[in-house]
Amino acid sequence: MKLALVGAGQRGMIYSEYAYNTKKVEIVAVVETDDQRRATAAKKFNIPSRMQFASVEDFYQNGKIADAVIIASMDKDHYKQAMAALDLEYDILLEKPISPDPKECLEIQEKADKKGCKVIVCHVLRYTNFFATIKEIIDSRELGKVITIQHNENIGNFHIAHSFVRGNWRRSDLSSPLIMQKSCHDMDILTWLAGSEARRITSFGSLSYFKEEKAPANSTDRCLTCKAAEDCRFDALKAYMPVIGSWPAVAITADQTEEGIRKALMEGPYGKCVYRCDNDVCDNQVVLIEFKNNVTVSFNLSGFTNKMSRTIKVMCENGEIRGDDSLNQIEVTRFASNGVDGFEQRVIHTGSVQGGHGGGDVALMDDFLQLIETHSNSSRSSITQSVESHVMAFAAEQSRITGKVIDMDEFKEELRNF
């Protein structure tokens, strides 16, 4: 099987490396604007110089030279690159979000359907043992129907500083709003667990902390020259030096030495003061959802947590499900008749598995490769299923900005007619 890689950043390399290591896949081309990343991918996958491209236009001029493409470029590039790939009838593994523009999401879906091409969106959470187990419990109806869900995405204070204050996703105009870039995963999981499309959505949130008025006294624009760095938890040396060779240090420079890290922090965006960046995306957001089957959801997205995790509580007619994906642990409790008698409860340990996102990255790639090999159309995260989560995220952001409750059917109709 032959694959081409468009975007040789962290996510693209994760998917490509796993596929390549199966020994069933040849990575025949790489498209990457960054010279260093392009060279790294070419060396790792033994890609000849004639198949190394700085622009996607040059790559597509060669016609269809692979079975599928992995598109893992920046958010705003997805639409143009995916539409051109579909013109050549490529099947696509598409990193989320599909696009930062809701109309573009729908257009990619429509073109894929017209061309008969598979577009699989990297909604990796559906492929984790953790969320798949919760889905199985819900579908078994052992606790009756779902009534309401509480779901938290705990971004982690160091993660939001790295990715959404200093990093590539710090501004909506450069990438997409936080609710789209970070939490279309969660919108997807929630509609999957609820088993319904959304009826109404409202949302509140803001950039409340990572701004200049919160900066410590005597602080400066860069951590390496800052007098306040010693007492600041966001000091870039504290963030990156202890994790040289792993994420997020590997995202700031290919030179994973102390000298290389210091150079990147002195010259690049990751050494900037988190209170003096040009970021504008939210650092906290709440979304309330009413689904068409009357399941209600409260979703909380926050950068003010000590670790990265997702926690969930699913409240059903006859019991509840609680889970923490950082522990790979799920509690299933049947309701008691009173507050003093014993109650029935079991704890499920879903276990640690290979790969990022709780094994979701690996399971997603296995699914994608099997789809291409068998010419199947059955996938947990086809674009047809994935578009709903993106429209929900767009609606949540519109509600946050306008202060209005968004009727989802009306919102979708407006997008189609725009």
Image (spheres, rainbow, N blue to C red):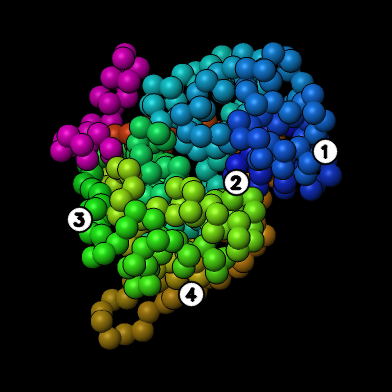
Residue at 60% in and 30% down:
33
Query: For mark 3, does the 10 Å Cα neighbourhood hold few (<14), some (14 to 19), or many (20 or more) residues?
Result: few
Q: CA distance from mark 1 to mark 3?
A: 50 Å
As for residue 38 lying within the magenta part, the answer is no
Whether the residues at callouts 1 and 2 have beta carbons within 8 Å, the answer is: no
Q: Residue 46, which numbered label? A: 1
Disc 4: which residue: 346
> In the rendered structure, which disc, 2 or 3, sits on the residue that comes first in sequence?
2
Q: Amino acid at mark 3?
A: Glu
> In the rendered structure, which disc, 1 or 2, sits on the residue that comes first in sequence?
2
Horizontal side of 118 relative to 234 (left or right) equals: right
Question: In this orientation, which residue lies closer to the viewer: 47 or 95?
Answer: 47
- Spot the residue most to the left: 403
Q: Residue 414, which numbered label? A: none
Whether the residues at callouts 4 and 3 have beta carbons within 8 Å, the answer is: no
Q: Amino acid at mark 4?
A: Arg
Q: CA distance from mark 4 to mark 3?
A: 48 Å
Disc 2: which residue: 10
Q: CA distance from mark 4 to mark 2?
A: 38 Å
Q: Nearer the viewer, mark 2 or mark 3?
A: 3
Query: For mark 4, does the 10 Å Cα neighbourhood hold few (<14), some (14 to 19), or many (20 or more) residues?
Result: few
Q: Amino acid at mark 2?
A: Gln
Disc 3: which residue: 213
Where does the magenta region start and end? Answer: 396-418
Horizontal side of 128 relative to 269 (left or right) equals: right
